[in-house]
Image (spheres, coloured by chain):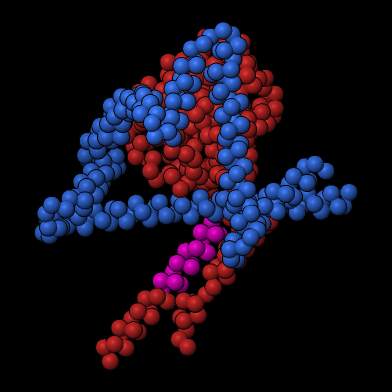
Chain colours: A red, B blue
Amino acid sequence: MAWYEPLLAIDRRVLYALMFLAVLIPTLLPIGLPIRITPEVQNVYDRIDGLRPGEIVFYALEYDPSTAAELEPMAMAMLRHAFSKDLRVLACCLSSTGVTLVEDEIARVAREYDREYGRDYVYLGYQPYPGIVIMTMGENFRTPFPLDYYKTPLDELPMMRGVRNYDDVALVFTVNATSGIDHWITYGQGRYKFPLGLGSAAVMATNYYQYVQSGQLFGIISGLRGAAEYEMLIDKGTVARKGMDVQSIAHALIVLFILFGNIAFLVERRRRRLGRAD
Amino acid sequence: MGDALLTTIAAGLTLCVLSFLYRENPFYRFAEHLAVGVSAGYWVVILYNQSFTAKVVEPLRQGDALPLLPCLLGLLLFTRFSPRAGWISRIPMAYILGVGSGAAPPLMLQTLVVQQFHATMRPISFTADGLTNLLILIGVVCGIAYFFFSTRHSGAFGVATKVGIWILMIGFGATFGFTVMGRVSLLLGRVNFLIDWVRLIFGAGGA
């Protein structure tokens, strides 16, 4: 048997087991590998850090349990940054299966900073058809959301007095793992020209970098890596930062799999060709 | 105790789903069907509580009957199930198509095409930004050239299409890299959850 043949016949379950160990071991024994801040994440941080206390940021937190592992640390970091800067937060979730998850996170971070509901932050909850909701919020937040998540009319909330539409918020930032990103770019920023930032699931990130270059997005935070960078910038939270050790080791393992697999494949192909030539 | 029980159920379901990595089995199918059913039920409840209550029930309580009109239009969609009355469903359908085709095309053209074109028409110079602009221009032109099939991909045009395919491959590679990162993050999320569960159970046992 040639040396490469076992490499081509490894049971996929062995690879799964190795991957599981590559994730488990650095989770239990963190290494603390360095993280470099990318310009796109720095832009988001600078934009929010430059706002004045009392200004309102609109956070559209649109993800659900299936992508929470990536986007929850990001959303928490964004909320912590806003509350630590005394900004007021207006939030919604246009993903139906994430509504209660997002509500829990906002309330948890608000408690950390002793923020009061209705005065320092408001959660609008969910409405269907994100494109229509985003467009009508440009006229008045009360059109798609006559009541907030807790069924209180928006006019009864102190923070919402005088707040009508996107003109009254400093910026919009969406943490998103849905096609809602396109809706925010097209029906939101495209129509109302507000500053828009994006925190996306890693799998979708490459589809949106061109909007940073064109100026349609002021920055982009992608996946757990972006969340780790943001945690470093605000110096709070460790969930994503700890995850970076795991990412590095798991990625190194995958690169090894790809290298060994391809080397073995190429050697075998060459031997076959030589065998045919003989 | 309640938290420990609920977390144990969630951990059990996580293990059921992960068992698929070994082979397809009834535990995995149970968890899969449960997830689909719960998601659908959850969506209905959220839709009723968040949308129907706010936009129909509350206004009706206050004497505003206008929300009944969109409700009626929505109900008319169900006439599609009747061969004789099916034509009525075209009324709400026409409304939906009218709104969609009125709102979407101008904005999509503006944001997805015109503004993206603008981003490729930036000054080219021997600065870092200028060279980046040149790289973007070459990438866009060569990438589009690859999808032009009305002429043979040979000569100078063939070189451009070859550059185009390399640009596309780099794009696919970046997407694959990000996808791997995303999937590892999701696995990490589950592993963290299982570790927390083990600690919770042992902690409870110790107490």
Quadrant housing residue B99: top left
- Which residue is located at x 46 percent, y 80 percent? A4
Residue B189 visible in the snapshot: no
Front in this rendered view, residue A255 or A234: A255
Compared with A237, B207 (above or below) is: below
Residue B32 visible in the snapshot: yes
Residue farthest along the bottom direction in this orientation: A278
Where residue B129 appears, as percent x and y from the top left, is 29, 39
Front in this rendered view, residue B46 or B94: B94
- Which residue is located at x 51 percent, y 11 percent? B65
Residue farthest along the front direction in this orientation: B84
Labels in figure, total = 0
Quadrant housing residue A148: top right
Quadrant housing residue A90: top right
Q: Is residue A100 left or right of residue A230?
A: right
Name the quarter where the N terminus of chain B is drawn. top right
Q: Is residue B163 left or right of residue A40?
A: left
- Which residue is located at x 75 percent, y 54 percent? B198
Magenta stretch: dominant SS?
helix
* Residue A141 falls inside the magenta stretch: no
- Which residue is located at x 22 percent, y 35 percent? B121
| Magenta part of the chain | A247-263
Where residue A277 appears, as percent x and y from the top left, is 26, 88
Where residue B148 appears, as percent x and y from the top left, is 17, 50
